[in-house]
Amino acid sequence: MSKKHADPASETPSERPSKTQLKREMHELQALGETLIAMKPAERARFALSDDLQHAIDETARIPSREARRRHMQYVGKLMRKEDLPAIRAEFDAMEQERVQRDQAFHRLEKWRDRLIDEGDDAVDGFLREYPDADRQTLRQLIRNARREREQQKPPSSARKLFKHLRESAALKAQD
């Protein structure tokens, strides 16, 4: 029996993906390529991309026409099929994890700032236990100024300065 006239009953649907599934996968790869294009070059450098894909990504910035860009994105999607997708997705996951950790650290420092302004010297001792390199005198001055601003219902410029000082103190500890 020739290939052209193979028995359709012998092929099961699970052997090959449907046309819809193939299209969906192609669109996912294209979206992944667009995400890579939107990244800053320093972020993109973290990915192990082939030279062809890297060149196509760089070339995207020089395409002004909407239709030409659409076709180029299809080409990027085609090149994405040859890439190490699990490694690319793992790097995206690692970047997301770093972002979550930064956000958590930011929120922790915001809570410290609010606690320092509300509780004063009692909270300063707790903060200095956790971040011993912080400058007590500067911290107390910023807290006093932030409290005064809050009482006088002024813009929170000292609270922002306090937060900046807390961020710098936390960064000093992170570098140790």
Image (spheres, grey):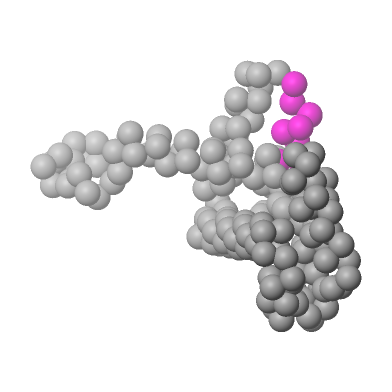
Residue bounds of the magenta highlight: 57-64
Foreground of the two, 81 or 94: 94
Residue at (47, 36) in percent of width and height: 27
Rendering coords of residue 121 (x, y %): 74, 71
In the picture, residue 108 is in which quadrant? Answer: bottom right
Left/right of residue 160 with respect to residue 79 in the rendered view: right
Image quadrant occupied by the C terminus: bottom right
Residue 62 part of the magenta-drawn span: yes
Left/right of residue 151 with respect to residue 47 in the rendered view: right
Residue at (60, 60) in percent of width and height: 104
Residue at (71, 81) in percent of width and height: 129
Rendering coords of residue 87 (x, y %): 56, 62
**Residue farthest to the front, as pictured:** 151
Rendering coords of residue 68 (x, y %): 66, 22
Residue at (72, 33) in percent of width and height: 60
Image quadrant occupied by the N terminus: top left
Classify 55 as above or below 168: above
Q: How many marks?
A: 0
Foreground of the two, 31 or 57: 31
Left/right of residue 144 with respect to residue 118 in the rendered view: right
**Residue 1 seen anywhere in this rendered image of the structure:** no
Residue 153 part of the magenta-drawn span: no
In the picture, residue 47 is in which quadrant? Answer: bottom right
In the picture, residue 56 is in which quadrant? Answer: top right
**Residue farthest to the left, as pictured:** 9
Left/right of residue 66 with respect to residue 24 in the rendered view: right
**Residue 2 seen anywhere in this rendered image of the structure:** yes
Foreground of the two, 115 or 6: 115
Rendering coords of residue 85 (x, y %): 52, 55
